[in-house]
Image (cartoon, coloured by chain):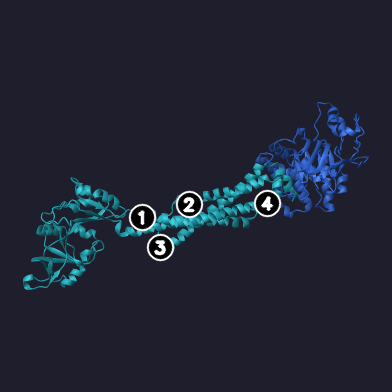
Amino acid sequence: MLQRPGRSALTVLGTIAGIGGFVAIVALSQTAAGQIGKDFNVQDATQVTVTDSGARGGSAHPTMDFPVNADALADRIHGVIAAGVWWQVQLANQNVSALPPSDGGTRVGLPITAASPGALVASGAQLATGVLFNQFHESAAQDVAVLGKSAAAQLGISSLVNQPAIFIGEQPFTVVGILAGDPRLPQLNLSVTVPESTALRLWGPPPSYFPAQMLIHTRLGAAQVVAEQAAVALRPDNPRLLTATAPASQAGLKKSVTASLNTVFLALAAVALLIGAVGIANTTLVAVLERSGEIGLRRALGARPRHIALQFLAESTALGLFGGLVGACLGVLIAIAVTISEHWTALLDDRVVFAAPVAGAVIGLLAGLYPSLRASAIEPADALRR
Amino acid sequence: MTLAGYEPPVIRMSAVGYTYHGPPPVQALKPTDLVIRRGEHVAIMGPSGSGKSTLLNLLGLLDRPTEGRLEIDGIDLGHASERDRAAVRARHIGFVFQSFHLLPHRSAVENVMLAQVYADMPRRRRYAAAMSALREVGLGPRAHALPTELSGGERQRVAIARALVNRPSLLLCDEPTGNLDSTATKELTDLLDALHGQGATLVVITHNPVVAARAQRQVRIRDGRLSEKGPELTEQPEQPEQPEQPEQPEQPEQPDHVLAPEARWLEEPGAAEGERMEGSHALPGA
């Protein structure tokens, strides 16, 4: 075997291709699945939404089940970066104007949102100018507002230099900030946002058909755990009033993606492995026939048929093992190369890498069975005659 | 010599025959008696197809006789298990082939050590034993050369070293000089003579009369029948030849001698030096 390195290498090629393909495919499918999961993660995996599922009373006597200090309670949960309550205010008259209505200012129909300062932070709101209202405005229930980008444009407000005011109905609000964008609550761009306590004071709790929500921004990977704890943390007395949902777990998604990729590609790898096994079997068989002189000699020197069979079995197994080792290395290299070119993060189960050479050896062993039996059945007298 | 000192002959064939199964069945070796004693140097000659190879395969335990009884060192091996026969091949028989049968990618000493693998020689002692065998055949300095770097004569000497390394009771040489030129042939026959001088038992199958002439006994084989060329050469198969050894005192009936040699051996172990029965025998017509 070692005396014919060229042929051994060619023989092993099939096994290398099979094992290499196997490892590369498994690695790439794992990486791709991880990559898909990661794309989903970036926004969603750090977000938990708590809804007021216990809201009742319709529009007549609405209640709200989030406690007054909900932001602070949520902040205590491990893994929470920011959290806050918000809801869409439902008013009979949603007209907003930049001048007092009595002065004949233009009225614009805009959605009005109540949000705690924490909700603005958790939503990732970015300011074009001014500031977000803060805990001071909240606790004092100040009549302040933050305008979304579109809302500001519709109201003709682009600068805060003159401390502009707006009127919701007849109620004046001081504009403290204008948003540039809001990744998690894009509807804030369209609306006038006022502090939660101010909305409660002026308009009362939200109706049960559009209840309040809490938006929680968590650290990466903490969403599931935070979701499990949020309801109890906010309403330890009656957690069933609140329902926390995290984005769909990626585990299931990953599994299904991996499964579909695997079935197709693993079938291809299996074909390559089969070809590799046939290659080893073929070469071993040729070697048996070609080395019949050596077989006869070894038998004449006292080797038993078993010794001959073991010798060829060992050679084919070594070929398979070698193919498995090289194939595993190649497979990992291919997976890494693809991963780098796609700017992915390589993911590979190390069990696959370690199992590959073993699989190669087993394939070599199986492939060598028939040729070995043939070799051991050769009559020494016949073999020596060559 | 006393019975206590009796040593079984290296080879004792009693009515050993071999028939290829056909179809049609071919009786390559007619039932034959042959005794080769320790220290003898026997040449076996015959044309191609005469049954030489069959005889060699039987003697070397590479094939099983289809009839008769074959003993080596007093052990019946014609019907022994393959395992026992392999063990005897490893320890009691050394083979030398016309085509050398050296592994081309192993050095001379590695080729010699190969013979020790199946003789259960402890690994650490193999190298020293192989080197000593190579020195014996005069190849000590070439021990690490590959067969391709050796001349034909040297290769055959490597093969002889390999055959000798396990100290076999029998050295079985199949046309050992068939691939050698006259110089190498001379060297090789000198080496065989020297080995014989040291007490080795040699059976040499050869076409070469020069090689055969070195042997104490010349056995001819033709059409599956053996005949011994002694002082009085008898070629007729039907007629058993006279044992060369005049000292055979009690020669039973001549015609039966084919079956008798063992009995004589037992009675007169000492007398048998060089004694040889050739059997051409029983089934002349077959």
Question: Is the residue marked by circle 1 packed among few (<14), some (14-19), or many (20+) residues within 10 Å?
Answer: some
Q: Amino acid at mark 1?
A: Leu
Precedes in sequence: disc 4 or disc 2 = 4
Q: In this orientation, which residue lies closer to the viewer: A72 or A270?
A: A270
SS for callout 4: helix
Chain where mark 2 sits: A
Q: Is residue A292 left or right of residue A244?
A: right
SS for callout 2: helix
Precedes in sequence: disc 3 or disc 4 = 4
SS for callout 3: loop
Chain where mark 1 sits: A
Where is residue A162 drawn, in percent x and y?
Answer: 13, 71
Where is residue B170 drawn, in percent x and y?
Answer: 78, 39
Where is residue B70 drawn, in percent x and y?
Answer: 78, 36
Q: Amino acid at mark 3?
A: His
* Foreground tag (2 vs 1): 1
Which label was assigned to residue A353?
Answer: 2
- Chain B: colour as depicted: blue
Precedes in sequence: disc 3 or disc 1 = 1
Which label was assigned to residue A343?
Answer: 3
Q: Which residue is mark 1?
A: A253
Precedes in sequence: disc 1 or disc 4 = 1
Q: Which residue is mark 4?
A: A289
Question: Is the residue marked by circle 3 packed among few (<14), some (14-19), or many (20+) residues within 10 Å?
Answer: few
Chain where mark 4 sits: A
Q: CA distance from mark 3 to mark 4?
A: 51 Å
Q: CA distance from mark 2 to mark 1?
A: 24 Å
